Image (cartoon, rainbow, N blue to C red):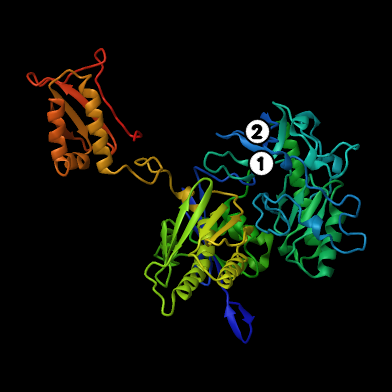
Amino acid sequence: MVRGILVGRGAVQLTKKLIVNVADYETRLALLENGQVIEVQHERTRDLGIVGNIYLGRVQRVLPGMQAAFVEIGLEKAAFLYVGDLVPPKSAEEKSPTQSQNGAPQKSAESNHTAENGAGEDDDSVEASLPWSSDSGVFPKASDIIHNQKNRGYASTERPAEKKRNDARRLRIEEVLKQGQELLVQVIKDAIGTKGPRITCNITLPGRHIVFMPTYDHVGVSRKIVAEDERNRLKSILDDVRPEGTGFVARTLSMGVADEKLRADANYLISVWRDIQKRMVNLPPASLVQPELGLVKKCARDRLSEDVDSLIIDCSESFERVKQFVQMVDTQLLEKVEHYDGNEAIFDHYGIETELARAMSRKVWLKSGGYLIFDEAEALTAIDVNTGKFVGRRNLEDTILRTNLEAVKEVAYQLRLRNIGGMVIIDFIDMEEDEHRTKVLSALEDELKKDKARCNVVKISELGLVEMTRQRKRESLGNFLSEPCFYCEGKGTLKSKRTTVYEIFRELERQATRLHFNVLVVHAHPVVVDMIYGEEGESLAELEDKLAKQIIVKPRGSFHQEQYDIFGQRAVSGQEAKTNNGNEKTAPRMGDA
């Protein structure tokens, strides 16, 4: 089913498809808009993502200087807990949690929920994951399910009465946490590079229509729901059903949903929280309490909606499981779930493999002949824009502007496809006219509005540099699918052959005074040996005369290009010498200049 969106006099058709490739070892999900690959996610059986997982953690170390703590949650790396994730965001406690003094919805209160956890009203892609069910549980008392942590040493999220309501920022983490203390925490960001996962004490339990926040006294509604009557209806329902001291957020998908359905959702999530509370009592510290939902079901819960045309799965077993899941969620969406049984691999059929290969490339060509260079580092990602083969038709400024405007669309697309997050520096081609800079910056901001991840753009500099940030919750596609090169040790470059040759010559001069033999033997990579006997043959002969020793260079195919060994050898016996009290003298040099 294809939908048309009217724009001006014409109609632009926007089709959305979710394509799922399932294998025993890996599940892949791709979002296609009008046939173009927009996003790709991977879930590997041996390396499942942890965002959304709830753990019973144990404080490993408190860092007053950073106002943070390392918490052991049972993974290889300790998790990072910032003081701001220890205390729930400030809600408007002087007013009703659902209305301001004049009865209007509180926009400010709704926007300050923890930005990282994905459960904010402006972000329907909730990363924390729990199963959804239409089962309605018995409404529990707040005391049965909330703040029941005293036996576990849980840090209470309630601030002392004598403190002001706005003093959460002044809270000192060393006053609240102690080494060995146990905490119920939720992962909000995967481990990336050398950094461990980031966690929060502000638990969020998402359902299809609403998100339950057991530690946050607040009711909010998605900003995408703009009708005041509907916002008030949703707030009234959720405010009525929530236990004291807890909160709910109505997601975009809650718009128009019947009251009974929302209450059933709320009661189910409350019962899930109650079960979590019970389980954690009997678990040892650093244990997983509640895992996140799998990638496919999570996609069906969070992404399958009226504006999505189809969810296509190539695995019959997964297809049946998702159908059962969607049957519980919303029977009207059942017809959108399809099974792919074509002979061609599903990612090949939809051109996803080709786009994935392009996303792994450092250079991305533009249709005009220009190109982009992506350099992703731990601190930031640099993107360089070049005119390349594009020479334009009018003048230089026009060529530069057209290239930069074309680059804007591709940059925004690649950031989303590659899932690049953190700080990004874009080096546009220098523009002399302020009008052109403004036009490029405005175009970039417009393109980034299509991105569900939060983006913040700083004004363009006179040199054409744009600083921006993009929300990062998991590893980029490049980091996930690749690893540092074992040959260059992640540097991306090698010493030139000539540099290695000259290092060998200098080392021969050093060793000549230590190895009292007539012959010096060098083992090196074949390409280095070729240069020594070829272009540097004259230099080798001069070195032999200078040292009054014969130098023999032998190729070793197993050597790294920067590696070499030097031995002393007796000319008469041909026996390789031993130096340093019988130890063989070797000199692998893979880092010295």
Left or right of 349 in this view: 273: right
Q: Quadrant of residue 237?
A: bottom right
Left or right of 585 in this view: 548: left
**416 to 284, vertically: above or below:** below
Q: Secondary structure at mark 2?
A: strand
- Marks 1 and 2, how far apart at CA: 9 Å
Residue 579's label in the rendered image is none
In percent of the image, x 42 and y 56: which residue is there?
362
Q: Which quadrant is the C terminus positioned in?
A: top left
Q: Which quadrant is the N terminus positioned in?
A: bottom right
Left or right of 501 in this view: 21: right
Please name the amino acid that badge 2 sits on.
Val
Tell me whether circle 1 and circle 2 mark residues in contact (CB < 8 Å): yes
**327 to 523, vertically: above or below:** below
Instruction: Give the image location of residue 500, x and y in percent.
Output: 27, 38
One can see residue 124 in this view: yes
Q: Quadrant of residue 542?
A: top left
Mark 2, Cα crowd under 10 Å, few <14 / some 14-19 / many 20+, is: many
Instruction: Give the image location of residue 42, x and y in percent.
Output: 51, 52
Q: Secondary structure at mark 1?
A: strand
In percent of the image, x 81 and y 38: which residue is there?
147
Mark 1, Cα crowd under 10 Å, few <14 / some 14-19 / many 20+, is: many
Along the viewing direction, whichever of 376 and 208 lies nearer the viewer: 376
**55 to 427, vertically: above or below:** above
Residue 71's label in the rendered image is 2
Residue 199's label in the rendered image is 1
